[in-house]
Amino acid sequence: MLGIEARICSRFFLACQANQTHFLVRAAQNRRTEADEEEITYSLDRARAFPSQQSRPLEVPARHGHKARSTQVQLAFGHMTLLPPRHEPQASNEPLTVWVIRVWEELAPEGEKPLEWILLTSVPTTTLEQARERVDWYRQRWLVEEYHQCLKSGCRIEERQLQTVDALMRLLGVLSPLAVRLLQVRAYAREAPQRPASEVIEPLMLAVLAQRSGHSPATMTLGTFWTEVARLGGYLARRRDGPPGWRTIWKGWLSLQTLLEGAHLALHLHL
């Protein structure tokens, strides 16, 4: 498996170079590197030998049964030259110089595995400010993963069984804005659940959901709005229940769109 991963990673680096595109990835393998003394060393070992250059706070989001938490991490960075994988005819024979940023947690809460990221990037990283920026780039992966989870589980894009790239691109053109909008509303509901929903949600949509759920549009909060959308998708909202998943939200949002379409038709007929 490690050999397969190494070949895939090398092809990815080559593809980035061919398309003149930068990359930022998290290292998972102890790849061979070229040391100053021309001896063979290994990337993860060398990165872990970098001395800490700064201690900084970091917010770790909730994931896979782990609660969100605040922690303090160490930051170090440097550069190294990765050697091409052996026994891979399609790989480049040229070494690849990368910048390396390591973030690690020295003290983790009981029951939690200490956090460690070793990031490889083609973007020059020579200052602490640049290293912090690269870490912030990598932190966006959680949001990107949620976006793809919404497309995969909520919008069920993998079940559409489209046969051509053009058809898939047209479907993405419809579903991607929806996934972004759902991510936005969920973020609003999490960050400020008591904020009035009227500041974020379209008036007619808010009125329809408020009427359907027995709330007042003027007093409905974003937290309540999100919960009521989930209820339309089958969410029971019991005290012991966790937050609704994307499949439930997707069902609820579709039900709300159907109600909204009916409201639009009713307004048109009334005129």
Image (cartoon, helix red, strand yellow):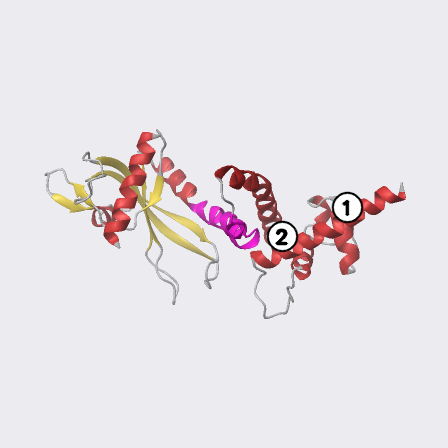
Which of marks 1 and 2 precedes in the sequence? 2
Counting from the top left corner in percent of width and height, residue 67 is at 48, 61
Give the residue drawn at x 29%, y 35%: 14
Apparent side of residue 34 relative to residue 143 in the rendered image (left or right): left
Q: Dot 1, crowdedness within 10 Å: few (<14), some or many (≥20)?
A: few
Report if the CB atoms under discs 2 and 1 are less than 8 Å apart: no
Indicate which disc residue 189 carries.
2
Q: Dot 2, crowdedness within 10 Å: few (<14), some or many (≥20)?
A: many
Counting from the top left corner in percent of width and height, residue 236 is at 65, 67
Indicate which disc residue 204 carries.
1
Indicate which disc residue 43 carries.
none
Q: Is residue 245 above or below residue 165?
A: below
Q: Quadrant of the N terminus?
A: bottom left
Apparent side of residue 229 relative to residue 180 in the rendered image (left or right): right
Apparent side of residue 80 relative to residue 74 in the rendered image (left or right): left
Residue extent of the magenta highlight: 139-161
